[in-house]
Image (cartoon, grey):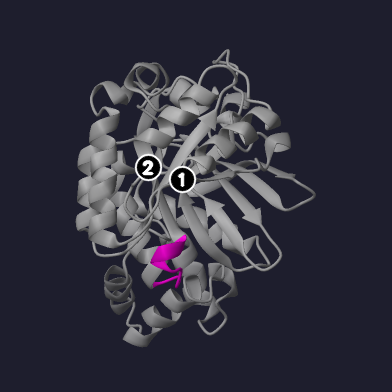
Amino acid sequence: MTTRYNITLEQLTQHLATLNEKPFRAKQIWEGLYQQCRPLSEITNVGADLRDHLGDFLPLALSEVVRRDGDHGTTTKWLWQSERDHTQIETVLMRYRDRATVCVSSQAGCAMACSFCATGQAGFERHLDVGEIVEQVVRAQHDSPQRVSNVVFMGMGEPLANLDAVWAATERIHADMGISARHITISTVGIVPGMRKLADLPLPVTLAVSLHAPDDELRDELVPINKRYPIAAVIEAAREYVARKGRRVTFEYACIERVNDQLVRAEALADLLRGFPGGAHVNLIPLNATAGFNGSPAGNLRIQNFANALTDRGVNATVRRNRGTDIDAACGQLRARNA
């Protein structure tokens, strides 16, 4: 199925040629869709008849099922349904005073089965295609008065399990929408072959590794793929990424009360990451509670003590303030509630 943000510029040019349109028309439409980031109906330097034709020929891939606004209107979450097969995915827009960040999904569902994640609990349906990924970013920009300057692949799915489509979308977001590669973050639970392949690709995107535990025994429970790619292999692949790209890697750590937030875990994590090239950065995230997991979010004091233990041992740590908790903004939650 060819959709509005799945078609390439070459394919668009070829199609317009069959309509006896001049080649510059394709460039006008492309710039309107991506550089100007307008809905097709608002690209007014193209005639209405051609816009109507392209609206039929290039339908949107996603239809809105649910939209929720939270955090006093600065966070928006969409539940979309694919026009192709009715699978559902989620996108989150986080607006700040002078910029905006979009968190996009790369798969419908997820096969990684992380025990605390609503998406992992729901299982895997399919990979998203390039158009479905790019469309999330573009339509979020349509809704944001601030420029979308950051894109994070931290929504539903494991991006490195769908790397071909994720990378093609990344190139379009970078080249055609003009978003800096350094402001595009691709997250992984530690798919080592994918991390190595990502290091070979040309753009210096930011890599985020969802670690969640400093030892294999606990990580096997929280992140089952650890049994295939244990912590030592993940850390080594992250080191290789830094060596190739010269970019700092972020380690994500969901803090679960009395499961992985003890000070002894912080000490073990510091030992693991001390001396990491470029300086490791740990992003501590209060757990987003889900119905399928019995754990609770670590309290603010416990998380701050964990962060202090890391920084005291030479590892940079920040505590992320969760946004959108009032609108089920954590990945998989809105879809689960609307199942």
Which element carries disc 2, helix, strand or loop?
loop
Q: Nearer the viewer, residue 249 or 272?
A: 272
Question: Whole-percent x and y of residue 119?
Answer: 48, 28
Q: How many marks?
A: 2
Is there any visible trace of residue 127 in the rendered image? Answer: no
182 falls in the magenta region:
yes
Asked whether, in this view, residue 57 is left or right of residue 191, the answer is right
3 over 92 or under it: above or below: below
Q: Nearer the viewer, residue 229 or 167?
A: 229
Residue depicted at 37% across the width and 40% down the height: 273
For label 2, count other residues whose C-alpha is less than 10 Å away and answer few (under 14), some (14-19) or many (20+): some
Tell me which label, 1 or 2, sits earlier in the chain. 2
Q: Which residues are magenta?
A: 176-183
Q: Amino acid at mark 1?
A: Gly
**Circle 1 residue:** 314
For label 1, count other residues whose C-alpha is less than 10 Å away and answer few (under 14), some (14-19) or many (20+): some
- For residue 328, what is the image quadrant? top right
Question: Whole-percent x and y of residue 305?
Answer: 62, 32
Q: CA distance from mark 1 to mark 2?
A: 7 Å
Q: Amino acid at mark 2?
A: Arg
Residues tagged 1 and 2 counted as in contact (Cβ below 8 A)? yes
**Circle 2 residue:** 274
Question: Whole-percent x and y of residue 190?
Answer: 31, 36
54 over 155 or under it: above or below: below
Is there any visible trace of residue 116 in the rendered image? Answer: yes
Asked whether, in this view, residue 19 is left or right of residue 67, the answer is left
